[in-house]
Image (cartoon, rainbow, N blue to C red):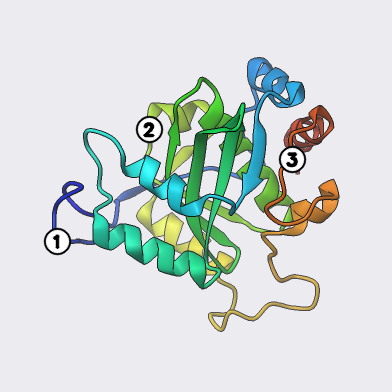
Amino acid sequence: MSDSRDAREVFWVEPKRRAILPLDGFHLSRSLRKTLRSGRFTVTRDSAFEEVVALCAERAETWINAQIEESYLHLHRLGHAHSVECWEDGELVGGLYGVKLGRAFFGESMFSSRPDASKVALAWLVARLRVGGFSLLDCQFMTDHLRSLGAVEVLQTDYVVMLSAALGDGSGRFGAGEAPEFGALDRLLGSDPGRTVDSPAAGCAIAQLLGQTS
């Protein structure tokens, strides 16, 4: 993290209590379900990563400085960092980005310039992680927004156990058919990676998936 947009120094933070969002515990409210089904937002993934990071940093107080921003862009170019974008009338109005490692996805930041845009982005992310065989969505720090969507706090010791399980045997290898896949949702919806998905049918599929518990 950094102290501000213009700060030159970067430091590491390890929360004593970690915010995670259980993938089978996403809170899908009636209003959010309705928004998903309406097809109001066009949803893409990895089609505007750089813009999402820049918009997440575009606020009065931010921990994203130039060095951090470039680091995430590099991770994205290597295929380790991903974004989910929400568009309305051709304008990027919400989104999030994060890093995947093993079966864990580390949500870094999100933004929204229209009501429900970041909620829709998070809903699509959770659905993508569930379909792709992930087991941990790390939100890092708890906020009222995340808590309303089902996030919970766990002790650092418990988090380390969850993280170790999500990383497998430490080699990055998983058994046959068990490797996590960030793009699995694309095949389920019949779309290509990064392709625009704006039909109410796709939103209904996401709502139905999130309404299922394991």
Q: Is residue 64 left or right of residue 44?
A: left
Task: State which mark lies toward you, 2 or 1.
Answer: 1
Residue under label 1: 9
Q: Measured from the top left, where is residue 59 in percent x and y? A: 28, 35
Task: State which mark lies toward you, 2 or 3.
Answer: 3
Q: Closer to the camera, 64 or 174? A: 64
Residue located at (62% from left, 56% from top): 135
Among numbered discs 2 and 3, the one appearing first in the sequence? 2
Q: CA distance from mark 2 to mark 3?
A: 29 Å
Residue located at (35% from left, 66% from top): 71
Q: Is residue 106 above or below residue 151?
A: below
Residue under label 2: 143
Amino acid at dot 3? Val
Q: CA distance from mark 3 to mark 1?
A: 39 Å
The circle on residue 197 is 3
- For residue 206, what is the image quadrant? top right
User: What kind of element bears circle 1?
Assistant: loop
Residue located at (83% from left, 46% from top): 189
Q: Is residue 37 visible?
A: yes
- For residue 43, what is the image quadrant? top right
* Local crowd size for mark 2, using a 10 Å CA cut-off: few (<14), some (14–19), many (≥20): few
Amino acid at dot 1? Glu
* Local crowd size for mark 3, using a 10 Å CA cut-off: few (<14), some (14–19), many (≥20): many
Residue located at (53% from left, 49% from top): 48
User: What kind of element bears circle 2?
Assistant: loop
Q: Is residue 139 above or below residue 150?
A: below
Marks 2,3: beta carbons within 8 A: no
Amino acid at dot 2? Thr
Q: Measured from the top left, where is residue 114 in percent x and y? A: 50, 22
**Residue that protrudes farthest toward the top in the picture:** 31
